[in-house]
Image (cartoon, helix red, strand yellow):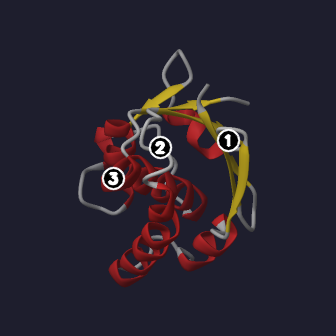
Amino acid sequence: MNAKLCFESEKLVLQFGGQTIDIPLSVAKLQARFTPYPPSEMAWEEAIMQVEDLISLYRDVLKDDRVIELYHAEPLQILADENRQISTEIFETAFAVLAGYRPTRDLPKLAHHATSAAFVLVMREWMHHLGFEAAVIAD
């Protein structure tokens, strides 16, 4: 069974191995930090550190998980393939495009606004730091 991550406006809810954990990471506050869009390099760096600090606590308990199911992650649906999956590589590309490191043509369907930036950042850091290979849009 895959771990599950539910995006709520003021927290993330992680479910794995019969446990439910509230992660005090607010997508709404990340969106506010990224407004006006595009965010400054400092805003990106501060947000990255915040996300890393809050999710790194779960590295050891999730070490055997490779796929995460995402709930209430509508802004990420545009990145999913026909099987509703999003690879780590796609999250990395999306982040690079939104942060201005890669051209928009590398991911033309991606919306460029604070909401997309917040969701992409959370998942880019999640995949990168916790060793997941793919995410699946579950709802």
Q: Nearer the viewer, mark 1 or mark 3?
A: 1
Three-letter amino acid code at disc 2?
Leu
Find out whether the residues at labels 2 and 1 contact each other: C-beta distance under 8 Å: no
Q: Residue furthest bottom?
A: 42
Q: Nearer the viewer, mark 2 or mark 1?
A: 1
What percent of the width, then of the height, locates residue 97? 33, 52
Quadrant of the image for the C terminus?
Answer: top right
- Compared to residue 111, the image places residue 43 above or below, namely below
Three-letter amino acid code at disc 1?
Glu
Residue 33, label in figure? none
- Compared to residue 18, the image places residue 44 above or below, namely below
Report helix, strand or loop for mark 3.
Answer: helix
Report helix, strand or loop for mark 2.
Answer: loop
- Density class for disc 3 (Cα within 10 Å; few <14, some 14-19, many ≥20) is many
In front here: 20 or 112? 20
In front here: 25 or 40? 25
- Which numbered disc, 2 or 1, marks the residue that appears first in the sequence? 1
Q: Residue furthest top?
A: 82
Quadrant of the image for the N terminus?
Answer: top right
What residue is shown at x 36% (from left), y 44% (from top)?
131
What percent of the width, then of the height, locates residue 108? 39, 39
Find out whether the residues at labels 2 and 3 contact each other: C-beta distance under 8 Å: yes
- Which numbered disc, 1 or 3, marks the residue that appears first in the sequence? 1
Q: Can you identify the residue that label 1 sits on?
A: 74
Report helix, strand or loop for mark 1.
Answer: helix
Distance, label 2 to label 3, CA atoms, is: 9 Å
- Density class for disc 2 (Cα within 10 Å; few <14, some 14-19, many ≥20) is some
Q: Can you identify the residue that label 3 sits on?
A: 97
- Compared to residue 27, the image places residue 82 above or below, namely above
Name the side, left or right, on which 9 lies relative to 96.
right
Q: Can you identify the residue that label 2 sits on?
A: 110
